[in-house]
Amino acid sequence: MEPIRVGMVGVGGFGGYRRDRMRATGLFQFVACWDYNPAASAAAAEQDGFAVMDNYEALLARTDVEAIVISTGATSHAEYAIQAAQAGKHIFVEKPLCCDWDELNTLLDAGEMMGMGHSAPDGPVNELIREYIAADKLGTITAIEMTTCHGGGWCESPWRFIKAKNPGGMLFQCGIHDLAWVEPMFGPVAEVASFMRYDVNHGTETSDATVTILRLRNGIVCTLNAYHVTAYHHYKFIYGTKGNLYIYEFPTEVYFQERSPQGKPEHKVRIEEKDFPAGKDHSTTNVRTWAVAIRGMGDPCPSIYDGASAVATIFAAEESTRTGRIVAVPDYRARVKA
């Protein structure tokens, strides 16, 4: 297939990681870039042959750029994506997609092929979960618990203090990974009830601790806890009528606990990594599927609708906290089927 001719905004920091992943696919031609940090642009030009532009508008004006990759901070994702769509470019944007409902609706109406920087659900642990479900080792999935505590490594940059730019606090920054995981694996969120605490870190406007209850459209109930004022800790627990999976992250440890209706001891047994099924290189799935989708061969995974559903759930969680009510979440994935 003909390589995708890309322009890129944000080439340093996480943008460097994204360039590595794109380069590994062999599906992209790096054409031009712009970064507010001239040193980052110069380094990217030396490594990947980018032409360095003076500003974002000049990058969008290039007729030899057919697609834009946005690897900037979260506060500018929507702004740059909307400009790229207006310029008729295909778009790949890092998570989170945007910061409010108005930005979300504008992006959904843009009409360009848009991929998302969420991780695709095709790594070894996710393949293990699918195997256990297919073999009926878990029975009926009843509930899911997800927790993301990131206080130890949370970067306190000014925009992270501002509620309008960081809705939900750590729910927006890291909990969004869990939302982008649970929906493709288990189904879309139907409604949300959420409680947010703001009184622990007085230096920010954003939530210090959030507990969110999700009901999926298939009936599964989930809890998602997101804290930025506690020690680092991440896990996902899946509860079924026949057994449970306990997934601890960073480093990865997975345990299975089989249910015993006869009252026998129900021990947790560790599943060693050597016994995980072979997963795809999920670090390149998002950019690879976006590239082939631009050429008319399938859909990007994750897509803009995955990104939309994740941020919409967070916006609904904030609304639930503010109103004290359960809030419905639109089914954006239905647009793919339509």
Image (cartoon, grey):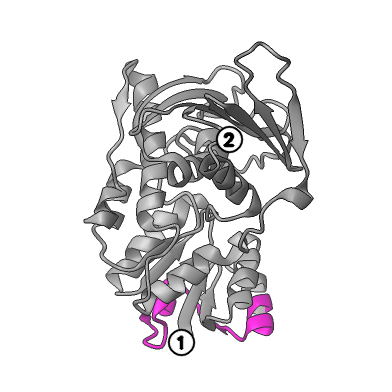
Q: Nearer the viewer, residue 155 or 145?
A: 145
Q: Say which label, 2 or 1, has the lower sequence index.
A: 1
Image depth: mark 2 or mark 1 in front:
2
Q: Nearer the viewer, residue 338 or 250?
A: 338
x and y percentages locating residue 28 in the rendered image: 52, 81
Which segment did they paint magenta? Answer: 43-67
Give me the disc on residue 137.
2
Q: Is residue 153 visible?
A: yes
Relative to 162, 22 lies left or right = right
Q: Residue furthest left?
A: 338
* Magenta residue check for 62: yes
* Magenta residue check for 34: no
Q: Residues within 10 Å of mark 1 (few under 14, many from 20)?
A: few
Q: Nearer the viewer, residue 290 or 242?
A: 242
The image shows residue 295, relative to residue 265, as above or below, that is below
Relative to 128, 210 lies left or right = left
x and y percentages locating residue 174 in the rendered image: 57, 40
Quarter placement of the C terminus: bottom left
Residue found at x 45% / y 55%:
76
C-alpha gap between disc 2 and disc 1: 41 Å
Q: Is residue 148 visible?
A: no
Name the amino acid, label 2: Lys
Quadrant of the image occupied by residue 278: bottom right
Name the amino acid, label 1: Met
Residue found at x 57% / y 25%:
208
Relative to 242, 79 lies left or right = left
x and y percentages locating residue 131 in the rendered image: 58, 46
Residue found at x 48% / y 85%:
3
Kindly check if marks 2 and 1 are in contact, taking CB atoms under 8 A apart as contact: no
Q: Which residue is mark 1?
A: 1
Residue found at x 51% / y 68%:
287
Q: Nearer the viewer, residue 97 or 263?
A: 263
